[in-house]
Image (spheres, grey):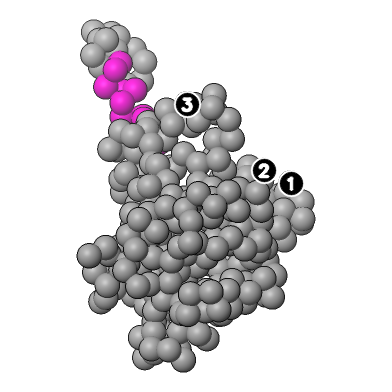
Amino acid sequence: MARLDGKVAVITGGASGIGESAVRLFVAEGARVVIGDVQEERARALAAELGSATRAVVADVREDRAVAGLVATAVEEFGALDVMYNNAGVGMVEGEIADAPEETFDFVTAINLKGVWLGIKHAARRMREHGGGAIISTASVAGLHGFERQAVYAMTKAGVISLTSSAAAEGGPHGIRVNCICPGGIVTPLSAPSPRAEEIVAERFADIHPLGRAGQPLDIAQAALWLASDESSLVTGQAIVVDGGWSSVDARWQRLIGQMSDRNRAGVRPGGAPLDAE
């Protein structure tokens, strides 16, 4: 028996990256899935490939009506809503707070935070009436520590983590579990928009992950699968970190220690002077 047999899911940002990987995995595990995305061509192509277990809906998560429409499609087409995966998000190099335009704040916040809030809102309404369900959102390790020159992105992901806790408290009595996933360095079209960029980004992510490899969309999709399944039936209000160990260490300190070790092996003190110099 597949792990999501009989379940109906909505996945936002489902046409590419982590979302696409989750759609494919959920369908393979027996779910019927509504793919919500602004990328109409990609969403419809994915639905056509995967067949009758999917529906593609063009939806901008910044809009209340659009998110409500995703839930309505799941119910109308498949008869239920068991899983809501709020995955749609955006990130960019924003610059320092002192120099960033207000438009950046509004754009990133509307997608990354308001979009998740709307997803929880409309999913919870349906799930309260029908005995519960699982709500999952994509946060980030940036929400745990903050990122230079990506302050708005980090702020929104911290907001998703906080929102998860609040929604879990509200949803618990109704059988609704609410969790989020905090990815580390994942190679997706958002982080690496070209084949050459993919190589560079994968190398850099591998360098900052103690496990020594970059994350892939399937790594996050597998965490989402577990949270969507009955295997995690006692898990709610959690921020599940999937980052190759990145957040467990200070990567800059690790690089400094590595540089000092290299110097020591070369017969040089950490301060730069030869070991036999006084």
Residue 29 forms part of the magenta stretch: no
- Classify mark 2: helix, strand or loop: loop
> Mark 3 vs mark 1: which is more N-terminal?
1
Distance of label 3 from label 1 (alpha carbons): 30 Å
Give residue 87's position: percent from left, percent from top.
Answer: 51, 59
Q: How far apart are marks 2 and 3 (CA)?
A: 24 Å
- Percent from the top left, x then y, of residue 18? 47, 50
Is the residue marked by circle 1 packed among few (<14), some (14-19), or many (20+) residues within 10 Å? few
The amino acid pointed to by label 3 is: Glu
Answer above or below: position of 117 versus 138.
Answer: below
Picture residue at 27% right of the left edge, 64% below the top: 3
Q: What residue type is labelled 2?
A: Gly
Q: Are marks 2 and 1 in contact (CB under 8 Å)?
A: yes
In the image, what residue occupies the spot 67% across and 71% down?
Answer: 66
What span is in magenta?
252-263
Q: Does 165 appear above or below 157? A: below
Quarter of the figure that contains the C terminus = top left
Q: Residue 119, located in which quarter of the rendered image?
A: bottom right
Amino acid, disc 1: Asp
Residue receiving disc 1: 99
Q: In this orientation, which residue lies closer to the viewer: 256 or 87?
A: 87
* Badge 2: residue crowd in 10 Å (few <14, some 14–19, many ≥20): some
Residue labelled with disc 2: 95
